Amino acid sequence: MLGGVDQCDVIVALRATVYGGELGYGAEAFDWGPMDDRAFHLLALDEKESAVAAMRLLGPEARPFELETSVALEPHLRTGHRPGEITRFCIAQEFRPITRGLPVHTGMIRLLHDTCRQHRIDDVFICAKRGAQRLYEFALYETLAAPEIPYAPLGGEAHVLMRLHIPTLVTRYRAVNHPLRRAFEPQAVDAQRGDS
């Protein structure tokens, strides 16, 4: 419970704002469904406990993934690597701009990294909208297929299949002095411990 409100209601409200209000998708894109019951939900709150970002993470036990209704995942799976899928990732509009210093972005990448490590997920897959491809590439996702996948869960709109390798993420961020490396610096870890 968050301030007397169920966490799933908070997540659905943020999804409805982004996927429904901003992007114009129907309720099937943001309502709570059976796949949500099998997922880990990552949620970022502001100081007033309002949801500012949410992400649904499916582990290997939740396969078939949502993206597997639109694209064959098997050719992209690596032997010995446990896969996961990110879906319904959304950030409230006022927290999206990169110019704000990336606090929500770094927090979400840290939550994703820590949750994947905890549940032994090595490779995270996402079907991203074409307009978001560069943002995910910025976060060091690799593009696996041309942005022409008709993604059934979001109206058949063209998406691109991408993958993020979790075990080497921190090393890769540090190697290129990436802005998201701040999520893994000692002061970020201490701040997160203080919030728990």
Image (cartoon, rainbow, N blue to C red):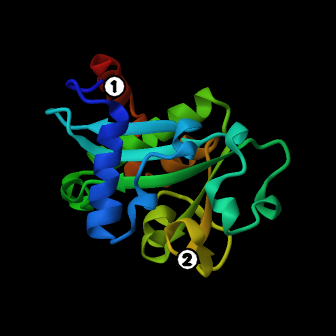
Q: Nearer the viewer, residue 59 or 4?
A: 4
Q: Is residue 159 left or right of residue 186?
A: right
Residue at the image point whose x is 33% and y is 70% from the top = 23
Q: CA distance from mark 2 to mark 1?
A: 38 Å
Q: Nearer the viewer, residue 52 or 66?
A: 66
Residue type at mark 1? Gln
Disc on res. 156: 2
Q: Secondary structure at mark 2?
A: loop
- Percent across and percent down for residue 39 are 55, 38
Q: Nearer the viewer, residue 159 or 104?
A: 159
Residue at the image point whose x is 82% and y is 63% from the top = 75
Q: Are marks 2 and 1 in contact (CB under 8 Å)?
A: no
For the C terminus, give its image quadrant: top left
* Residue 92 location, quadrant: bottom left
Q: How many marks?
A: 2
Density class for disc 2 (Cα within 10 Å; few <14, some 14-19, many ≥20) is: few
Q: Secondary structure at mark 1?
A: helix
Does residue 126 lie above or below 105 as drawn? below
Residue type at mark 2? Gly
- From the image, tell me which residue sits under label 1: 192
* Residue 184 location, quadrant: top left
Density class for disc 1 (Cα within 10 Å; few <14, some 14-19, many ≥20) is: few
